[in-house]
Amino acid sequence: MEQPITQSILAVDLGGTSILLGEVTLDGKVLHTQSYPTNTATQAAAMENIQKAISDYLGTAPRIARELIAIGIGVVGRVDRAQGVWMEIQPGKTNPTDVRSIIEQQFGLPCGIDNDVSCATLAELKHGWGRESKDFIYLNVGTGIAAGFVVNGAIIEGSHFNAGEIGHMVVDMNSDAICACGRRGCVERLSSGLGLHERVINLRSQYPDTAIAIEEGKRVAAETIFEQAQAGDALAERVTEEGARALAAAIMNMVRVSDPDTIVLGGGVGGNAYFKELVGQYLNPKTMRFVANGIAGTKQETPEAGLVGAAMVGLEAWTMKQGSVVS
């Protein structure tokens, strides 16, 4: 007879278009999930949506474990994990928000918060490749691009909680793709879901016969671009090839920086088998010779790595509370 689950954590994963909430066990098993709309135009709006989503989930979602012990939150942007403060949602929009205090006061549970990619990296460290490797890079290629660097078993945060923002790594000095950071040729502008879309829009006039349909106000999905590239569409082929070459350059640059034995490639774009294979064709064997496990997928059982990582941050907050009570 299966033993009942006694404790769980409510995990929150803030994405660009939705918030995913879920009940997660202490050992990283996702029990139930529920999705909510979000607004990430401002940090205040996103925070309000997070609070509403948690309230609704607690009031409507089925509870599987006997006791909910903590809330863990993963968000985009810079986070001071130790203090529980969300520093900013994106560069230029700094608005330090004491998320830990706000959530704990409202819901009466210990709360932890971290950057979404850091959460996914933590999940991989605890429940995936981290069981075999002390030095790996978790590379998330989705709407944007960011990475988590694990060195000697620890995730690097940086002095301003900004480590891993490799989307702004320049991979083409001669590129015409101008980035919001002020430089041109950043890998995020060429290889991310948003970057691929922007390249299609900017190059569209040069390819009047393209089969890529562009709808006003809607993003061209990376999946659509890859499908058209495989079908021989010239515009899709160019954008996909440029994106793969740029991402390969970024990967090789990262390899030279931290000397990992594994690159874990995740995210909606990075997880595409066609694109991943194309990226592999641009990797230099000499540069990659010490990356023993190569470009790998996650070793976790669930695709919701960000949710699992958020739960681990919540568990950390609960553990710290328990320690303070004991002492």
Image (spheres, grey):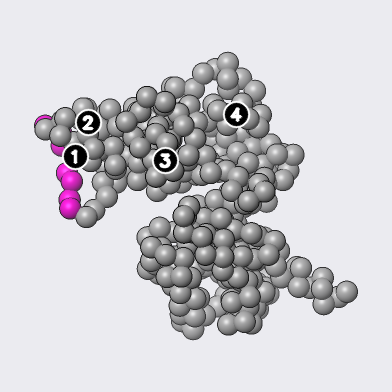
Q: Quadrant of residue 135?
A: top right
Seen as rendered, the residue at the extreme left is 209
Please, what is the three-letter code of the amino acid marked with disc 2?
Answer: Leu
The answer to whether the residues at label 4 and label 3 have Cβ atoms under 8 Å apart is no
Q: Secondary structure at mark 4?
A: helix
Location of mark 2 (residue): 235
The residue identified by callout 4 is 255
Count residues near mark 3 (Cα–Cα under 10 Å), then give few for <14, some for 14-19, many for 20+.
Answer: few
Magenta span of residues: 209-216
Which residue lies under the disc numbered 1?
Answer: 212
Callout 4: 10 Å neighbours few (<14), some, many (20+)? many
Q: Is residue 11 visible?
A: no
Say which element carries label 2: helix
Q: Residue furthest top?
A: 286
Magenta part, dominant SS: loop
In-image side of 46 versus 5 (left or right): left
Q: Residue at x 34, y 34 (%)?
A: 177
